[in-house]
Image (cartoon, helix red, strand yellow):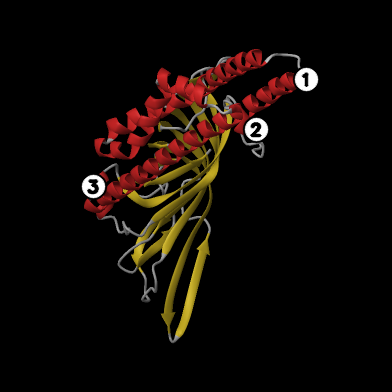
Amino acid sequence: MNRILYLMLFLLFTMHSYAQSEFENRIKMIKTDIEIIKSQEKETLRLEVEAINYRLEKGEITTSEAEIQKKAVSEKCADRIEARIEPLEKEIQALVKGEVEEKDDRIDNLEDIDEENEKDDDEEYRDKKKREIDFDRISIDWKPRKNKKYRGESRTTTQFVFAFGLNNLITDGDFGSIEDNGIKLSNSRFYEWGWTWKTRLAQNSPFLHLKYGLSFTYNNLRPENNQYYIKTGDKTILADHPESLRDEPYFRNINMVLPVHIEFDFSKKRMSEESAIIRTQKTFRLGVGGYAGINIRSKQLLEYKADGLETEQITKGDYNTSDFIYGLSAYFGYKDVSLYTKYDLNPLFTDNDIDQNNISLGLRFDFH
């Protein structure tokens, strides 16, 4: 069981490092957006000032009237900048607050962001910036970029799912049997890939979703001690192989399943002037549910050497495995990455004297 504990600690550390990287990238993106907004508004101001200067040259207005109009458009420019960057500043403050609560020693990396926010919020600083604008020296080579609009997601979204990790068997519901069931713990693995659809259950809340889809799972079992699976009538058991097996034999079941989960997404919704902006998978997620499907193939691969000849033997067919697959599954993670577990409620072999159920633990990626 110590190996399972070490694996879980490694997975959690990996998820934490990924979350920290995502946090820093988001901060950089927001700061870039703020600079773009400021540049756009300065370009708008430049055009307005040129129009005032043109009217001055034509004698349509006096010099004092031109100065009054320039001051008015500069104040409007500052107000527009403030209104546009305020939601971004609030998002930075929320991100920083959450990161500080999670780990205090990361606050040093964010001090420059806090200082910039406080400076922008200071009314005297904004007034000073208004006065420092030199209308005649604004660069005319700068080309404005299109305004970045934040749009919410559709109520139903699609994800590509990929998962991998350790795979093994539980005998008669006893989780302690996983260490002494004839199956290698460290080298038996599972893989899963598929597509899911996620539908918000509330129109204006990102919290609760119904997640459903189609997946293919590859559950591999690697017997130890030179054993392999044999079929004897309606039973399938482990037996000693007469030759010395090379590499490691594996027994694989490929299933096609329909997973269904209730997902709790703790992302915060944002408010615009028109409506709420919903974007999911921005923070922690929890999914609980299950799956049902069919076994589409069972096969065993053996490699051994006898009489100087190397043999690779692949056997496919009916190993008395359950045709109907169903079970429970759950995941918990941050953004696209989760710690994932699934447990087959159906026995692996239908008529054996003891029931053995497949169990998996690993990492899951929901590419949004």
Q: Nearer the viewer, residue 137 or 323?
A: 137
Q: Is residue 161 above or below residue 74?
A: below
Residue 95 is situated, as x and y percent measured from the top left of the image, at 38, 30
What numbered label is drawn on residue 176?
Answer: 3
Cα separation between marks 1 and 3? 91 Å
Secondary structure under the numbered disc 1 in the rendered image: loop
Taking the image as shown, residue 87 lies to the left or right of residue 246, namely right
Q: How many marks?
A: 3
Q: Nearer the viewer, residue 320 or 297?
A: 297
Tag 1 residue: 58
Q: Is residue 11 above or below residue 228?
A: above
Query: What amino acid type should be assigned to the residue bearing mark 1?
Result: Lys
Tag 2 residue: 146
Query: What amino acid type should be assigned to the residue bearing mark 3?
Result: Gly
Q: Nearer the viewer, residue 9 or 36?
A: 36
Instruction: Please rate how many residues cluster around mark 3, counting C-alpha atoms within 10 Å: few if below 14, some from 14 to 19, many from 20.
Output: few
Q: Is residue 115 above or below residue 1?
A: above
Please identify, in this view, whether the residue under mark 2 or under mark 1 is nearer the observer: 1
Instruction: Please rate how many residues cluster around mark 1, counting C-alpha atoms within 10 Å: few if below 14, some from 14 to 19, many from 20.
Output: few
What numbered label is drawn on residue 174?
Answer: none
* Mark closer to the chain start, 3 or 2: 2
Cα separation between marks 2 and 1? 32 Å
